[in-house]
Image (spheres, rainbow, N blue to C red):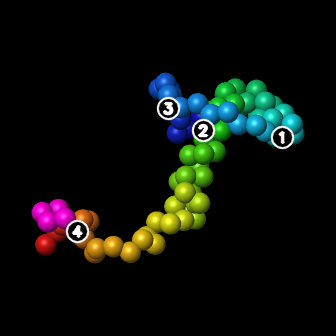
C-alpha cells in the first residue's frame, strides 16, 4: 500500500470492532493482499493528513507571541 513503511513498529494497540466491521476488514485485507494493520495504518494516515482533520482542529487557535519563541535569542528580529 502506498505511504506505508516496512520498518518495525514499536506501538501496538488493541481495538475492539463490531462483528460486521471485523468481517469487512478481514475480507478487504484478503482481497487487497495486505495485513489488517496495514489497512488501519493507512486509514489513520489519511485521517491525519486530510484537511479539516480532527487531529488538526486546534492548529492556529492558540494565542502567543508573533515570533517562533518568546525566549531571548530564539525569535527573528
Q: Is 66 drawn above or below residue 34 in the view shown?
A: below
Q: Quadrant of the N terminus?
A: top right
Q: Is 67 drawn above or below residue 32 in the view shown?
A: below
Residue 3, how many percent across, how many down? 52, 39
34 with respect to 18 (left or right): left
User: Quick one: SS at disc 3?
Assistant: loop
Extent of the magenta region: 70-74
Label drawn at residue 5: 3
Residue 39, how many percent across, how many down? 66, 36
Label drawn at residue 41: 2
Residue 11, how many percent across, how many down? 53, 32
Q: Which residue is mark 4?
A: 70
User: Quick one: SS at disc 2?
Assistant: helix
Q: Residue furthest front?
A: 71
Label drawn at residue 62: none
Dot in front, 3 or 4: 4
Instruction: Decide: few, some or many residues near mark 3? Use Cα within 10 Å; few <14, some 14-19, many ≥20.
Output: few
Dot in front, 2 or 4: 4
Residue 50 or 13: which is nearer the viewer? 13
Residue 25, how many percent across, how many down? 77, 35
Separation (CA) of disc 2 from disc 3? 10 Å
Label drawn at residue 18: 1
26 with respect to 13 (left or right): right
Nearer-N-terminus badge (4/1): 1
Nearer-N-terminus badge (3/4): 3
Residue in view at x 60 percent, y 41 percent: 42
Amino acid at each position: 500500500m502506498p505511504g506505508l513503511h516496512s520498518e518495525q513498529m514499536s506501538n501496538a494497540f488493541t481495538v475492539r470492532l463490531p462483528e460486521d466491521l471485523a468481517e469487512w476488514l478481514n475480507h478487504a485485507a484478503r482481497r487487497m493482499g495486505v495485513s489488517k494493520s496495514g489497512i488501519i495504518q493507512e486509514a489513520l494516515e489519511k485521517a491525519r493528513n486530510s484537511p479539516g482533520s480532527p487531529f488538526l482542529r486546534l492548529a492556529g487557535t492558540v494565542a502567543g507571541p508573533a515570533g517562533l519563541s518568546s525566549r531571548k535569542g530564539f525569535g527573528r528580529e
